[in-house]
Image (tube, rainbow, N blue to C red):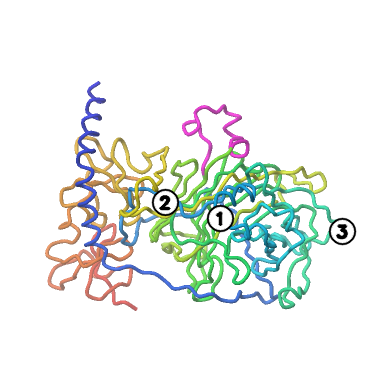
Amino acid sequence: MESSLRREILFKSLTKQADKLSMTIKVFFMLLTLFSCGSDHNNGQPSTTSSGLVAISKQRLDIAEQEVEQTSQESVSNPLSTKGWKLVFEDHFESAQVAINKGADPKCFSKSPVCLINWWGTEECPEFKTALADLNKCNWSVYHYYNYMDFEAPEGKGVNSFHPSMVQIKNGSLYLNAQKSFYNTRRCKQKFLDPRIGNLENYSIECPIISGGMESKKFEGKTSGYTQEFGRFEVRAKLNYGPGSWPAHWLLPQNLDENGCGWPYSGEIDIMESWANGAEHVAGTLHTGHCDKQIKLSKGFTWKAKEKFYPSLSFSEKKETFYKDYHTYAIEWDRDKIRFLVDDHYIGQVSAGDMIKNKKTPRGGLPVNIPKGPFYWILNTTIYNDTENKLDVNTFSKQEHIIDYVKSYKKCTEEDPASKCYQPEYKNTDALCPGIREYLGDFQGKSMCEAWPNIPISVANCFSKDGVLDTQNKLCLQNEGNWYKARTLGQACTTPREHVGWNSGRPVCKAFPHFKIKKSKCNGNIWESYCIWEKDGWWRARELK
């Protein structure tokens, strides 16, 4: 009873202080945000390999085998608004007439579809106009090419190609099916010179299994598509399952990176992927890298249908839920981080500056970059050569990947009415804020919560690198899985060094030669006359090179 009363009193106190605290936070962040960075992306022609073929070969995610080290080094940003999200794009895949009655342009349904004939080349395909009459063809283009997502299968050994007939809208849903093909001859993944793309090499599509896929990329003069930078991207779907199944909802950049490095250096955000050998698992992943070093980086998270998340399910239902039932898969993306969610359960976050190690990185790893620029939707069903589950292309049974809707949101601002702002009901809020602490937003990619002195936090104090937030010590931050009480502004830099800004989530302070610093050099290059905080103390910054 005493515990319940205390929680009630604290909650009421929190409610009374929320408005005042929110304003205090806003003022602090306006003062602390010293600069913002961005990059311009230019449209470019696709680059080709020596054989003239460009292929994106997605690597299977296995978190258990990845060497991932997160050092929680994030760049400065304004906190996420607590007002919620405003809807800016949606498709419920209703019939054309229903969509038109709701205000959609009739021309978007009567026009001929655009088909991709490899991952970048397009052509109109009027032969599928009737079959795709209910598809909004202003937003979506459909796939009609060999499915490159084959784990680099040898030439002639492919099993799956995309076909527009596998994209269907019925019963108010989008079906991206997979089934045995109707091709009389088997000529799958054979190279040929394709006059439709300037006699560059392409792959033949007469494969034993065909499946559906589509995207919202903009193709000048053909389809307006839909792209968006930052926000919440959400899909509600029932996944296909069986030998070889690999459904996916993901995002790719509209424009090539400015250095022409291609995939994955401009970023790939996998909202959801699932594979045949893990029915109770789904995964969300960011793929990126360092173009100048030609080193790819990936970081992601898997989600299991555990009893504590789905308590009403039996053991067998728990293992099957991700292909028996509809679930909502989402990301929340800003310039400093990407959060992954399943049914609004928080499953993980990638923050700018997180250090990732793999076989090609330096010993300490490389910091991850959060992608920027407009990204487009991809929804697809892949069937891969699944030897573990003994995929037999001759006895393959039809699989249905059913999508109820896709939605894109942007963060609400102070000018947006509350009625237009959607606030998700996060199921595992303890992952963001423990106990009754209210989630107030983000700072440097870390969750920011109300701190209560009489409710324990994992660690009572935080490192200097984590705190320039609150002069009254009323906030706490999450760092590497533990909760820390935020320090005051004056503790960001050791006296009398002036706090001058942030670099990669660390405070940057004026360095004075006549005051001792713990180390005479630092392991990162910033500015000659400044020092930065590392885990074991203050280091003098080297000259920027």
Which amino acid is tagged 1?
A: Trp
| Residue in front for this viewpoint, 241 or 403 | 403
Quarter of the image that includes the N terminus: top left
Give the image location of residue 390, x and y in percent.
75, 44
Q: Please give the name of the residue rendered at 56% of the width and 67% of the height, measured from the top-left corner.
A: 263
Judge whether 34 appears above or below 341 on screen.
Answer: below
Q: Give, as a single range, the part of the protein colored magenta.
A: 303-325
The answer to whether residue 201 is magenta is: no
Q: Which residue is denoted by mark 3 in the rendering?
A: 185
Q: Earlier in the sequence, mark 3 or mark 1?
A: 3
| Residue 190 appears left or right of 532 | right
Give the image location of residue 80, x and y in percent.
34, 53
Numbered circle sitting on residue 86: 2
| Residue in front for this viewpoint, 452 or 295 | 452
Between label 2 and label 1, give the one nearer the viewer: 2
Give the image location of residue 249, x and y in percent.
57, 52
Residue at the outermost top position: 1
The answer to whether residue 315 is magenta is: yes
| Residue 136 appears left or right of 545 | right
Q: Alpha carbon of mark 3 to alpha carbon of mark 1: how far?
A: 32 Å
Determine contact: label 2, label 1, CB under 8 Å.
no
Quarter of the image that includes the C terminus: bottom left
Q: Secondary structure at mark 2?
A: strand
Q: Which residue is denoted by mark 1 in the rendering?
A: 250
Which amino acid is tagged 3?
A: Thr
Q: Earlier in the sequence, mark 2 or mark 1?
A: 2
Which amino acid is tagged 2?
A: Lys
Label 1, residues with CA under 10 Å away: few <14, some 14-19, many ≥20? many
Give the image location of residue 144, x and y in percent.
72, 61
